[in-house]
Structure formats: structure tokens, C-alpha cells
Image (cartoon, helix red, strand yellow):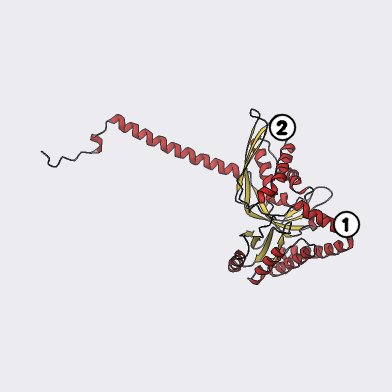
Amino acid sequence: RFGKQPERTMSEYVDDGHLMEVEERLKDQARAAEDRAQLERIGARVLGRTKGFGKLILFGEHFVVYKVPALVGAVAAYTDCECEVSTSGTPGVEVIDNRPAVPHYKIKKKDEGDVAIGLVLKHFGLDTEKKYSVKLTFGGDLTCVSGIGASAAQVVALSRALSYELPRPMTEDEINAAGYEGEKGYHGTPSGIDNTAATFGGLLRFQRTEGDPIFVKKQIKEPIRIVYASTGITASTTEVVGDVRAKKEADPAWFDGLLQKYCAIVAKAESAIDEADLVTLGKLMDENHLLCQELTVSCKELDDLVLAARSAGAIGAKMSGTGRGGLMLALTPTEESQNAVQAALEKLAPQVWTTMLA
């Protein structure tokens, strides 16, 4: 009575209708998975069209404001932006900022950022007080820190997103111009170098003029390996640039002397890049850092990181960007030296990154 029962197959427990239901459910799940994958691919393509790159100034901090050449390299890291524009919702701007950042950066920069976003929206003719509801979500892998051009990356990404969303097809020059308008919110009278690097990428020779800026994309014979590190200090570009201007006006001869030294350095640096002479390029970076010290835009934290990088094998190192905090960079000719400098700086700096200009 309680002996072993004959084995039965699963099909004997279910009818054909149930099997068809299960099969349809599995097909629906497969279709849903394909739809999700397609949406992810579409989303990735859209966000790819809204990138604004970070940058490192190789030569020309502060001097570039006075219409002399600077050399700037865009890093691979970027900010992207998702944009929703409607006339049916309550007018206003909602900003969701998911960008990675050093501590306190986004708090300190929020007011300037709000102005910058407003200027870009105004440039596009979007009245968010009476007509348009705008939702902006910023993301990407560029860590916001003084010196990396995070503000320019943000407003360029926003300009690209608006161009795509409205839609309003724009040339790269028009995107760059829209980004420049946004940069005014962060920097008052920006040089234009950051938004140009954020828009076009690559390694650029940049120079302000009375009219449109001149920029030339440099061809690099071999990759330039860079390590860059943060002091963890967030500086106000508007304040530091204003202070340098005040010093220039108080002692024009002193400033003109530094400016002439810088012009000689940047001319040699451009030749070194053209000739792939990294040793000379590194020495010129060291000289540019000395000028930044004389301008009083470096600080102990930057100087300590520069010295540590040189001691670890960098063939050149300098502050980069606004100064009085923010970033420094180091030139490392090989992967081994790049790793060694990175390890040395990680013992001192709160954040360290590597990149390659190519």
C-alpha cells in the first residue's frame, strides 16, 4: 500500500493551457529584457551626446586672462546632463546634482552654479519664471574639484542636453558659446579656456582676443601621462582672479615682468609638445609653477604635493587651475613612473587621479 509510486513527468501535472501560459510569460520576460537593454543603449547614446569634459591647464593659469597663449589638455572624465523641458508644469528649475565631488565643493559652488544654469537657460530663450518647467539631472564620472574645469563641464553638458531636448541643432562653436555664457555665472569674466576644452576635448593651444578666441587642436606624437591630485581645498576663481588683477594694477611693472617670462615658457612648451620632448616639457612645467608662486596663487598644500611628485619620479610638476587650493599635476613619462607618483601622492592628497593626453 505504501510502496514506491511510479515516477511521473512534469507534463502530467499540467495541462497544455498552462504550458502555453508559462511559455508566453517567458517570452514576455525576454521581450522586457530586450526593451530594457534597448532603453539603456538609447540612454547611453543620448548621454554620450551631452558630455562636457574636464580639463587640466598645462601652462597659462591667470596669464591667459591677459590675451597670451595657454596650453590645456582635456581629461577623459566628463559630466553629462539629462534634461526635461515642459510648458505644462509649474514654471521653475529643478536641479538634481549626482556628480561626484570633493567635500563641500557643491555647497560652496551652489549659488554660482544656480546663476550659471540660469544664464544658459536664458541664452536658449527659456523663461523659467513664467513659462517653462525645466528638470536637470547632472551625472558623469568627473569629480568636481577646483582646477578640473567642473563648472565648464557642467554648462557645456547642459548646453548639449538643451540642444538635444528642444531640439535645436547646434554647431560645436555654438555649444561652446552657450557654455561660455554659463561660465560667467561661476567666473564673472571667464577666459573661455575651460569651456573650449570641455567642448572640443584634446590638447589645445588657446588664446583670448578682442573678438572670438583662437584655439588650435594640437597633434601629439606620443601619449602624455599625467597624475593629478587635489588639495581638498575649494577656491573661488572669481576671488583669486580678482586678487591677481588687483596686484597687477598695483604694480604693473612687476606683473609685466612675470608675463614676459611666461610667454617665453609657453612658446618653448608648445615646441616641446610638437617634438615629443617630455624632459624639456617637464622642466618648463617646473618653471611655470615658480611663476605661479610669484603670483601668490600657489599655496603650501600645492607646493608640498608638487615636491612629493618630483621626488617620486615625476619629470615635471606644477599647480593647475585657479590655485590657492584645488589641483596640481605631474608629468610621468612611463606607466611605471605614473604608478609610483600616484602611490606617493595618495599618501598626502585626499584624491588622486591618472589620465593620458593623446
Q: Residue 92: image x %, image y %?
A: 68, 34
Most foreground residue, 257 or 36: 257
Residue 62 x/y as whole percent:
78, 57
279 left or right, relative to 189: left
Instruction: Answer above or below: position of 131 versus 270.
Output: above
Q: Quadrant of the C terminus?
A: bottom right
Across and down, in percent, residue 37 comes to 49, 41
Q: Name the residue type under label 1.
A: Glu
Q: Position of residue 89 (x, y in %)?
A: 64, 29
| Residue at the disc numbered 1 | 249
Near-viewer residue (189 or 69): 189
* Quadrant of the image occupied by residue 226: bottom right
Q: Is residue 172 visible?
A: no
Q: Which residue is mark 2?
A: 129
Helix, strand or loop for disc 2: loop
Q: Is residue 5 above or below residue 249?
A: above
Q: Amino acid at mark 2?
A: Glu
Q: Residues within 10 Å of mark 1 (few under 14, many from 20)?
A: few
